[in-house]
Structure formats: structure tokens, C-alpha cells
Amino acid sequence: MRNKITALIALFAITATAGASECPEAFDQSLRKLHSKENANLCELHKEGKATLIVNTASHCGFTKQFAGLEELHKQYGEKGLVVIGFPSADFKQEEKSEEGTARVCYENYGVTFVMFEHTAVKGEAANPAFKYLAAKTQKPSWNFNKYLIDSQGNVTHYGSMTSPMDSKLEKAVQQSLSF
């Protein structure tokens, strides 16, 4: 009986450790959704999908039109396990000053339905912990619309601003991430 109890305790410990490794500690944060009172936990969103695409966005950038491609990725692959998450940031001085303005650009101008969080820093000491983690794994965002694809195994791949969301290289990586 004692051996069975010890085995059960060991099994629970292994299960708890396996669950903890699925989501980086830097993602275990509850963030307010853009222009909303609703919060979402980044770990829970990440766990919902087989792949997560995190993007630092800006409302007044030459790459702002990439919202359309991000929305297309979300619609095409969301039900298959892709979670797209946007983080508007003024770090490159091209973001609306108000969340209301950012929300208007995202939701009205581009019809964004994927998760967008409140304004946040994505570089430097004040950077959101998720972006510090992503930068340590790959590279820090050098401009708006850097994309970080995290597969179900926790591997992170960085795509710069010049890579459009529907670029064949990024789309193929999304498809591969979803085939696990």
C-alpha cells in the first residue's frame, strides 16, 4: 500500500511538472483586453492552441495594413489551433495615444477579431515579461509588427516586420505547428 501511495505522489508530481512546462512563467499574467474591462491570462490563451502567434502592433505604421493578414491567419487557422495575440505598443512612437483610438483602428478599420491587449511596452527594461522572454529566445522587436510563432513544443521562431502574415514561409510554419 505504501508503494502505491508513493507511486501516486510521484505521478502527481510528474503531471504537475509537465503542466508547468507547457507555458513559460513570463506568460503567466492576466492582461486587460484592448479598450475593455475584460482580462485574459496569456498562459490560458497559449494553452488553448497548438500554436501561438504574438505580434507587437502599432496603429500608425507603414506595416499597420498587416492587421488584415493577421486577421486572415486567425480566421483560416484559428479553429485548427492557432491563437493570434496582438500587443499594441508606442515603443516606436507610432501608436495611438488612447486605447479608444487603437481599438478603432483594429476593430473598425481592420475588423480584428483576434485577442488584442492593452497598450504595453515591448522593449527595454519596461517591456512586458512575455516580450522579454521572446527576445531572449530569439531577438527583440526592432520595429512594429514583429511576429513570434510558438509551437506546441514551446519552440519560438521570430519573423520581422518585413514578413507579412500571409508570407508563405510564415504560413508554412503555422501549418507545421498545427500538424503536431
Image (cartoon, rainbow, N blue to C red):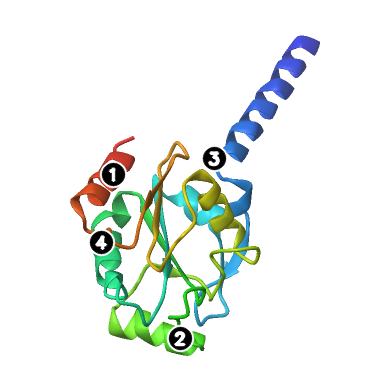
Residue at 66% across, 23% down = 11
Residue placed under numbered mark 4 in the picture: 164
Residue placed under numbered mark 3 in the picture: 22
Q: CA distance from mark 1 to mark 3?
A: 19 Å
Q: Are marks 4 and 1 in contact (CB under 8 Å)?
A: no
Residue 142, position as x, y percentages in the image:
44, 62
Tag 4 or tag 3, which sits nearer the N-term?
A: 3
Residue 73, position as x, y percentages in the image:
27, 59
Question: Of the residues shown, which amino acid type is indicated by label 2?
Answer: Glu
Q: Are marks 1 and 3 in contact (CB under 8 Å)?
A: no
* Viewer-side label of 4, 1: 4
Front-lying residue, 140 or 150 = 140
Q: Are marks 2 and 1 in contact (CB under 8 Å)?
A: no
* Viewer-side label of 2, 1: 2
Front-lying residue, 18 or 176 = 176
Q: CA distance from mark 2 to mark 1?
A: 31 Å
Q: Secondary structure at mark 2?
A: loop
Residue placed under numbered mark 2 in the picture: 96
Question: Of the residues shown, which amino acid type is indicated by label 3?
Answer: Glu
Label 4: how many Cα within 10 Å (few below 14, some 14–19, many 20+): many
> Residue 95 is drawn in which quadrant?
bottom left
Q: Quadrant of the C terminus?
A: top left
Residue at 59% across, 67% down = 31
Tag 1 or tag 4, which sits nearer the N-term?
A: 4
Q: CA distance from mark 4 to mark 1?
A: 13 Å
Residue placed under numbered mark 1 in the picture: 173
Front-lying residue, 12 or 56 = 56
Q: Secondary structure at mark 1?
A: helix
